[in-house]
Image (cartoon, rainbow, N blue to C red):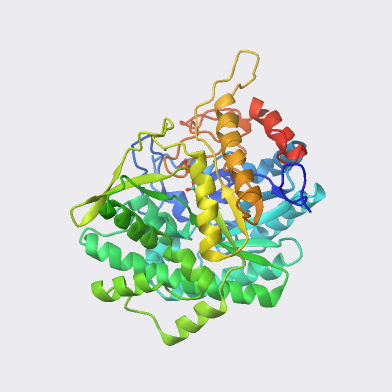
Amino acid sequence: MTTKSGLRPDFLWGGAVAAHQLEGAWQADGKGVSIADVMTAGANNVPRQITAGVQPGQNYPNHSAIDFYHHYKADIKLFAEMGFNCFRTSIAWTRIFPNGDESAPNEAGLKFYDDLFAECHKYGIEPVITLSHFELPYHLVSEYGGWRDRRVIDFFVHFAEVCFKRYRHSVKYWMTFNEINNQMMYMNDFTVATNSGLVFRHNEDAATREALMYQASHYEVVASALAVKIGHQINPNFEIGSMVNFTPLYPASAAPADILVAEKMMQRRYWWSDVQAWGHYPCGMEAYFKQHNLRPDITAEDRIVLQEGTVDYIGFSYYNSMTIAVDGEGFKIVANPTLETSEWDWPIDPIGLRYSLNWLQDRYHLPLMIVENGLGARDKVEADGRIHDPYRSAYLRAHIEQMIKAVNDDGVDLWGYTPWGCIDLVSAGTGQMSKRYGFIYVDKDDDGNGTLARSRKDSFYWYQKVIQTNGADL
Ligand code: BG6
């Protein structure tokens, strides 16, 4: 059965956030320090620094964020007012296991999420939960080197099992690792630290970085598969997905060399979801690993685990496409003259979302969920307190239109749509508050000043109407 828009009647409409970007309360109720707690504030084109532990005098924006930890009841009420029937957030690993390697969980942390999920259900809002969203316990980074150590598999699986058991009746939709494939950009300190807790040492050159990233990634896909398997044993009704950042790579021209390099880089960028969906590595990556002597530690048992823990759906974020051209032996990213860009230089490409939905459907034959999409932009509060943000609704409208075409014209099986940062929060990439995605404005600036008061932007009412009509009135 469908509705006027063509979307299923039980389509999941909501918004997405991650614990470390909004909860704040970084030391409350026994919480430990996570990798996000040692990231300083950056700015547009100024990278965030990863410090050795929490250092005095530094600005760590995630420490207090928007203090959702103490505001969640009022915030969820606002989500309910918009009509959300789902809400994507993550469980901060360090609230449950402050160091990551303890055997007993922290009851106060578990209790917080009991209360949060109960509050969602009060309004008929289904939680959609990411287990690991850039929140690795810092102790696992400093003592184990993050995911470069095989033992971290067991710590993650234990964390997953504790969460699955505790929330088996309150959460149905899960994802294991957020944007697990970001680390493909292994020369970027931020992405490898947030994905895998890899903080590179001075003697770790590009080749070493690449090798460590692939080994760490292998441990993560094994951990993910083990978690999926255990999750299904705990509750066979769980829907456990992968989560990739989907950025289609377009060839810059019709030159065969450009087409081939784009295809090869797509393979290099999406093998994580291949493994999670298919239960085995794609042959192109096996060949690449062999040629470059990468990912040496893979056992026969690992390969069985991968087969036994395939995901139920593909969750993905979509913000933009990228365009690439061959460059000597490698490739380079080039501007796409057909697309506008945001202030943060992210290309704006709604058709790319339809393309992505088609690509993912054809490759995996699994249900899809768009778990992030949105425009980071500066907002201005008018003298009367209102916030006019037509650019935000224009961006989302154009993407929802393409999403609906993908469902109606291309037959894509789409479960839901949760735009990113439904309430303003700390930007992951820059640590800024001023890069805002929300329908709900939060009074806080990049220096941490503000009352934390929440207010409805114009886009709040627009999205409310979209949800009310199940996407028919955009
Ligand atoms: C995704 C992440 O990469 O994009 C989020 O899953 C992040 O955590 C979002 O916030 C937007 O990126 P940014 O850098 O604008 O916050």
Q: Of all residues shown, which one is farthest toward the top? A: 383
Q: Foreground: 340 or 381?
A: 340
Residue 308's x, y, as percent? 56, 80
Image quadrant in which you'd find residue 149: bottom left
Residue at image location 67% in from the left, 43% down from the top: 70
Is residue 384 positioned above or below 452 on the image? above
**Is residue 88 found left or right of 283 in the rendered image?**
right
Is residue 322 positioned above or below 161 on the image? above
Residue 123's x, y, as percent? 80, 46
For the question of whether residue 213 can be seen, the reply is yes
Q: Quadrant of the N terminus?
A: bottom right
**Is residue 230 found left or right of 325 in the rendered image?**
right
Q: Quadrant of the C terminus?
A: top right
Residue 294's x, y, as percent? 29, 73
Residue 274's x, y, as percent? 47, 67
**Is residue 162 found left or right of 283 in the rendered image?**
right
